[in-house]
Image: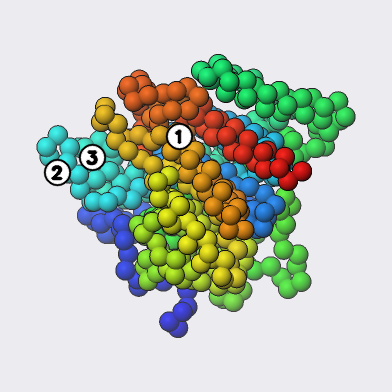
Amino acid sequence: MADNAWSPDSWRSKPIKQDVVYDDPKELEAVVGRVANLPPLVSSPEIDRLRAQLKDVAEGRAFLLQGGDCAESFDYCNPTAIEDKLKVLLQMSLVLLWGMRLPIVRIARMAGQYAKPRSSPYETVNGETIMSYRGDNVNSIDPACRRPDPQRLLQAYFHSASTVNFVRLLLDSGFADIHQPEAWDLGHVRNPEIRREYQSIVNRLTDSLEFMSVIGATSSQASALNTVDLYTSHEALLLEYEQALTRAVPKPLPGAEPAMAGRKRPYEPSTPPRKALAPELCDWYNLSAHFIWIGDRTRQLDGAHVEYFRGVKNPVGVKVGPTMDPAELVRVLDILDPDFESGRVTLITRYGAAKIADFLPAHVRAVQETRHRPVWCCDPCHGNTTTAPTGHKTRSFDAIISEITSSISIHRELGSRLSGVHLELTGEHVTECTGGSQELSHSDLPNNYQTFCDPRLNYEQSLDIAFKIAKVYESEREENN
């Protein structure tokens, strides 16, 4: 094999970080073999449609909203949790659509976000040193069940399949029908001035929808108003599992039209072929999700994860933080995007509100000197995690908003554009982050602190974020006009 040749298992020849060591390698091999013979979770035409839409995002014709749990639990695979998460993402996207006057590309951290990188393989619980919790597809949050269990990979597959199936059912059943919107309850907004501001936006939204109904724009033929595209994503951490769901798909015939945004192409077989395809006749897709990303701890240039990611056709994300040198960022792009495809890579920046001004400008300038056209996406959650006096891990809403607005301003000053946000959120009414229109304080955190991982924005705070971003871009439009 040539030094630069790629295959779904070429990552095995590279050093790997955050790998899981199992007691019984043969059991792992049997489980992975079982997953490799199961049907895919998503299709290659759906992935190609997302690629086309992310090209629009990278080129300023759309905006990316990506959000969901820090780490999914198998217990979240239930109708209420899925509906709540879908509802908040759809309502946020509607607010952003109104404020930005751009199509919104929706990607959920959902149906596969079961693994979690850790800074240490061990932790101390009740004075005892035990293995760290690595996510439901590795081990249990229960301290008595921390041994990595290969069977959990199989459970992750079936929980992902159930989640994807229910999301498709909801969207096909009119859950996203915007001419029958759910009532916008703003009773949680304590500040009267903010409530009036939000209510003004909601009134204009509903007026617009009523006008569209009067002129017939919400007829059954207007499918864009009846349903939406919603894509799944996760951090592709456990490469044995990702390889098992990496499938060869025949390349389009010469002269065939490429898939376009909003337009479906015929289904192409994506299960393991009965006869192996010649490498030049196929593309490789990771069919565990539409979009996958590399975390801040696994983006080594010579590492297994970068090696795996460079060969799949999926659009991919890379977490970018203070520890990444600008030259390293360019090299990562060179490896993952050798053909300079707009939107192929999403750069998910995560610095912290206090550090973004020190690091983002150099990263933007370094990329501007290349031919790469990535999606610039702000993750304002990870860099703003603190510990409250109550002992709870938390995040400040004000710090999250500060990082988003700083990112918008820095990109604008440099002639670039922030094209997306990546948020850890839930559709539930938890109390894990402080601030927002509910004005949650540290003393409120114990009231409904549910996360077993990082703190999430609750339903109300998530809508707050959407309203704040919409106002920024509405003001920008008014200035330009």
Marks 1 and 3: which is nearer the front?
1
Disc 1 residue type (three-letter)? Asp
Q: Please give the residue where the numbered disc 1 appears in the rendered image.
A: 398
Disc 2 residue type (three-letter)? Thr
Q: Who is closer to the viewer here, 10 or 162?
A: 10
> How far from the left and from the top, in percent, is residue 336?
51, 67
> How far from the left and from the top, in percent, is residue 387?
29, 35
Camera sees residue 404: yes
The residue furthest bottom is 2
Give the residue at x 63% y 24%. Answer: 197
> How far from the left and from the top, in percent, is residue 472?
62, 39
Mark positioned earlier in the residue sequence (2 or 3): 2
Q: Please give the residue where the numbered disc 3 appears in the rendered image.
A: 145
Disc 3 residue type (three-letter)? Cys
Q: Is residue 202 above or below residue 53?
A: above
Mark positioned earlier in the residue sequence (1 or 2): 2
Quarter of the image for the N terminus: give it: bottom left
Which quarter of the figure has residue 207? top right
Give the residue at x 74% y 35%. Answer: 225
Camera sees residue 77: no
Q: Which mark is residue 129?
A: 2
Marks 1 and 2: which is nearer the front?
1
Callout 2: helix, strand or loop? strand
How far apart marks 1 and 2 lie (CA) works out to 36 Å
Callout 1: helix, strand or loop? helix
Which quarter of the figure has residue 14? bottom left
Callout 3: helix, strand or loop? helix
Give the residue at x 64% y 68%. Answer: 251
Neighbor class of circle 2 (other Cα within 10 Å; few <14, some 14-19, many 20+) is few
How far apart marks 1 and 3 lie (CA) works out to 38 Å
